[in-house]
């Protein structure tokens, strides 16, 4: 993994010649060595099609291509940073939560309605995340941002995990999601904005949950 955690709000990435990374614009705090930062106009590893797809989906968070040899410190807005390692699977995460990630990962977008049907679309509206989400697939590492601390909850077959949609950050693996109603659930045990919904994730993988219901 090219990232090293400095503290809960800063990570350090190591670059070698021939390797590149992508970061959110404004996320660089400091660097050492011969490192270049250029605006990314090709949509990352997914190419122009990925860029167009993200813009149509409203997932057009500006990215920088980071290349060279040296180390770079990343952080943004004082948000908590969670490092996630991918080993061939797909990470589902909102574009504005991406701090930095390996250039080897392939970017794309997914319509939330395709996971959970109509309820997938409802989830996008309830969580305030829109109807599309960004995907990163392959082998590499990702640094994502969240409010407060983040916990990784494993998802095992036959043992679904239920999450407050406002606290959801990302998930990876072979996971299906659906939004279900639970009358009084938020009033009794949730801390959301009043909608009686919970996000159910099932299959095999993991979900990341933040200690807040705030958007970035």
Image: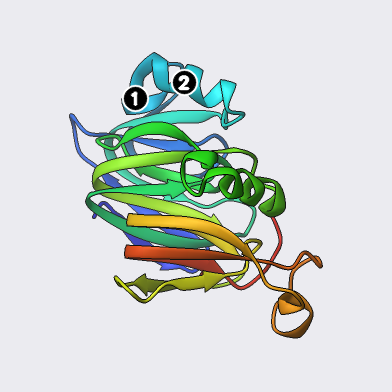
- The residue nearer to you, when weighing 131 against 44, is 131
- The residue nearer to you, when weighing 70 against 50, is 50
Q: Which residue is mark 1?
A: 46
- The residue nearer to you, when weighing 34 against 78, is 78
Badge 1 crowding class, 10 Å Cα cut-off, few under 14, some 14 to 19, many 20 or more, is some
- Mark linked to residue 110: none
Please say if 36 is above or below 212.
above
Residue at 45% from the left image edge and 33% from the top image edge: 109
Residue sitting at the far bottom: 188
Residue at 18% from the left image edge and 32% from the top image edge: 17
Please say if 208 is above or below 144.
below
Please say if 55 is above or below 1.
above
Answer whether residue 70 is visible to the viewer in this image.
Answer: yes
Q: Is residue 92 left or right of residue 89?
A: right
Residue 9 screen position, x and y as percent: 53, 63
Answer whether residue 150 is visible to the viewer in this image.
Answer: no
Residue 178 screen position, x and y as percent: 52, 57
Q: Is residue 38 left or right of residue 212?
A: left
Q: Earlier in the sequence, mark 1 or mark 2?
A: 1
Residue at 41% from the left image edge and 55% from the top image edge: 176
Residue at 62% from the left image edge and 29% from the top image edge: 58
On the image, which quarter does residue 1 sit in?
Answer: bottom left
Dot 2 lies on which element? helix
Residue 99 screen position, x and y as percent: 48, 46
Kindly check if marks 1 and 2 are in contact, taking CB atoms under 8 A apart as contact.
yes
Q: CA distance from mark 1 to mark 2?
A: 8 Å
Residue 175 screen position, x and y as percent: 36, 57
Badge 2 crowding class, 10 Å Cα cut-off, few under 14, some 14 to 19, many 20 or more, is many
Q: Which residue is mark 2?
A: 51
- The residue nearer to you, when weighing 15 against 115, is 115
Please say if 111 is above or below 201.
above
């Amino acid at each position: 993994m090219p990232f090293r955690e400095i503290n809960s709000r800063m990570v350090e990435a190591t670059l070698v010649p021939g390797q590149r990374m992508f970061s959110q614009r404004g996320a660089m705090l400091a660097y050492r060595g011969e490192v270049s930062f250029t605006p990314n106009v090709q949509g990352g590893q997914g190419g122009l099609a990925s860029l167009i797809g993200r813009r149509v989906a409203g997932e057009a968070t500006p990215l920088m291509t980071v290349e060279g040899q040296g180390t770079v410190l990343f952080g943004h807005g004082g948000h908590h940073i969670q490092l996630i390692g991918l080993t061939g699977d797909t990470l589902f995460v909102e574009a504005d939560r991406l701090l930095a990630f390996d250039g080897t990962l392939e970017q794309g977008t997914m319509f939330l309605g395709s996971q959970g049907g109509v309820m997938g679309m409802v989830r996008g509206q309830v969580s305030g995340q829109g109807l599309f989400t960004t995907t990163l697939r392959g082998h590499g590492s990702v640094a994502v941002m969240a409010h407060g601390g983040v916990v990784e909850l494993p998802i095992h077959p036959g043992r679904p995990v239920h999450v407050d949609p406002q606290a959801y950050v990302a998930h990876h693996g072979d996971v299906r999601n659906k939004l279900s109603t639970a009358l009084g659930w938020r009033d009794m045990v949730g801390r959301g904005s009043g909608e009686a919904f919970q996000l159910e994730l099932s299959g095999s993988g993991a979900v990341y949950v933040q200690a807040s219901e705030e958007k970035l």
